[in-house]
Structures are given as C-alpha cells and as structure tokens.
Image: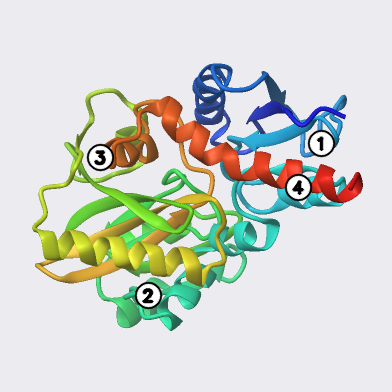
Amino acid sequence: MPTTPIITVFCGGVSPEREVSLGSGLASAVALSRLWPTRLVRIDEAALPAGLDSDRDVVYSTLHGTFGEDGGMQTLLDEAGFHYAGCRADSSALTMDKSRTKAACGAAGVRVAAELTFSADAKPTADAVADALGERVVIKPNDQGSSVGLVLATGRAEIAAGLAGITAGNWIAEPWLKGRELSIGVLAGKALGVVEIRPKSGVYDFTSKYTKGMTEYLAPAPLDAEATENVRRAAETAFAACGCRDYARVDFILCGRDELYLLEINTLPGMKETSLLPMSARCAGFDFTDLVRELVSPAVQRFREGLQSENP
C-alpha cells in the first residue's frame, strides 16, 4: 500500500463564500502539486464527493463558511475514515460560532467585546441593543465569515433599520470598536507575523476584502515589539482555547495602545497567495509553497501513521 497519498483539494462549496473558495482551492492545488500528487475537486453539494479512498486520499479543504468551516464536512470525513488537514469537527463548529468562540477565549484570558446574540425570529428592539451596547454597533451573522451580512449602525434609527433587514439566521451585535484591525496566522500552535488591515472605506466588509485596491495591507504591521508579542500571545492562547489543530488565522482589533480585542478565528481562511494567512506566513519567512507544505504535512503524517497501525 503506498505511503505517499494523493492530496485532494476541496473547493467551492455551498456557502456565500463559494467564489472565494474556488480561488483558494486553485492557488493551493497549484502549489501542492509541486510537493505531492494533487487533484482539485469542486464541491457542489453538502456531501462527500464520489471517488475518494481513505487509503489513498488526504484531504486539504479550502471550503469557507457553511458546511466547509463549521464542522459539517469534517464530520463526514471523520465518519468515512479520512485524514485531513486543519481543525477537527468539534473545534471547527466552535470557531464558526462567534459567540462560543468569544466565550472560550474570554475564559482563557483573551479580551472580548460585550455582545447580544439573537435569531431572526426573536430580534431585540433597537432600544434594547443600544441600552446594552451603546449607539454605535456592529451587527453580523453569528455563524458566517468574510463579513457576509455585516451591518454598521450609529444611532437607534440605524440600529432599527439594520435589525429590520434581518430575515433569517443567527446574529450577534457588538459595540462598534474603533481601532487598528490586525490578523495573524497560527501554525502548529505558534503565531506567525502580524498583518494590519487598512480598508480605504474605513470598513472591512465583503467589498473591501475582495475588491482589488480597496484595502491596504501592512505586513508586518507597524507595531512595537511589545504590542507584536501581545498579539502573538493572544493568538496562540485563542488557538489553544478553541482546540484548534494544524493551522488557523486569528483576527483582532487594537484599540488605543494596548486594548486588544478578539474578533474571530478562521479555521479555513482564504488561501490565495495574496490572502491574509499567506501574508502572515511571509512575515515569518514562508513563501506560499513553504506554507502549504506546512499546512498539509501533519495530515500526511497522520495518514502514514494510520497505515502503519493497520499494517504493522
């Protein structure tokens, strides 16, 4: 039985981030093909694709959002006996839920913002949101990524308008913190370089993320040594608190000099060469091919150990 697997890259998926995933998958597959036999598989439904073999395939998923990043695909892979790169199903499900992520990280000592969580069929009033969080708030889906559905509101009328537009799903409202947006990759539990995100519109929404020229990225971020170390330490703490495995990207906002708030953890972040995790990795000396090798190598090692245990 061969000990060199085929790296099977999943892309696409069924979430609003499908197009982003298609780009991540293609870029990753090109780089991985320099290292291992590799194939790219487009996912078009919430199911395992046909033609996989757990004695041959190691899965590297670039599925973002629902079913890809929330533990759904990982659960199917676990049940079918596949080895795969990245976080397990339980930590994927945890980190997809922003409120649960904040609870786990807050308990571990990472600073998190106040919040209100609600469903579309049980929305709070604008007055209730403003009384709890203030009149400048962020309202966003509790279990989506890439700023899908992000609402920024100032004043009770804008809060009411934002709430009125919500028709489905689970949501979270938080104070609209003003500060420097930072992102950092974590690889095998160790933080990489800090990237600062400066959207020209002032808001890092879906358009700013995925429209060329709309955002400036500073890699490494212009922080002093103490601030950089604080971000690194907080990212590693968050990674461990949520039971992450192999790799993730952690996002923060730095208010003032030293008030660092967790925003979210991305367990399957964007993986184009210009995405945030590759930027963070370049700050630590990894080019894109080096990075994908490090992302997939632990899964390949688990695959080989599994074969050895089955065939001593």
Are dots 3 and 2 in contact, CB under 8 Å?
no
Disc 2 residue type (three-letter): Val
Label located before the other in sequence (3 or 2): 2
Q: Kindly state the secondary structure of the residue where label 4 is placed.
A: helix
Left/right of residue 197 with respect to residue 267 in the rendered view? left
Gap between marks 4 and 1 measured at Cα: 23 Å
Q: Nearer the viewer, mark 2 or mark 1?
A: 1
Q: Kindly state the secondary structure of the residue where label 2 is placed.
A: helix
Gap between marks 2 and 1 measured at Cα: 41 Å
Q: Is residue 3 above or below residue 71?
A: above
Residue found at x 60% / y 45% = 298
Q: Nearer the viewer, mark 2 or mark 4?
A: 4
Disc 1 residue type (three-letter): Leu
Residue 305: which disc? 4
User: Mark 3: few, some, or many residues within 10 Å (few <14, many ≥20)?
Assistant: some
Q: Residue 130 in the image: x percent, y percent?
A: 31, 75
The residue indicated by pointer 2 is 129
Q: Is residue 89 above or below residue 174?
A: above
Q: Is residue 245 visible?
A: yes
The residue indicated by pointer 1 is 48
The residue indicated by pointer 3 is 283
User: Mark 1: few, some, or many residues within 10 Å (few <14, many ≥20)?
Assistant: some
Q: Nearer the viewer, residue 135 or 212?
A: 212
Q: Kindly state the secondary structure of the residue where label 3 is placed.
A: helix
Disc 3 residue type (three-letter): Cys
Gap between marks 2 and 4 measured at Cα: 52 Å
Label located before the other in sequence (4 or 1): 1
Label located before the other in sequence (1 or 3): 1
Gap between marks 3 and 2 measured at Cα: 40 Å
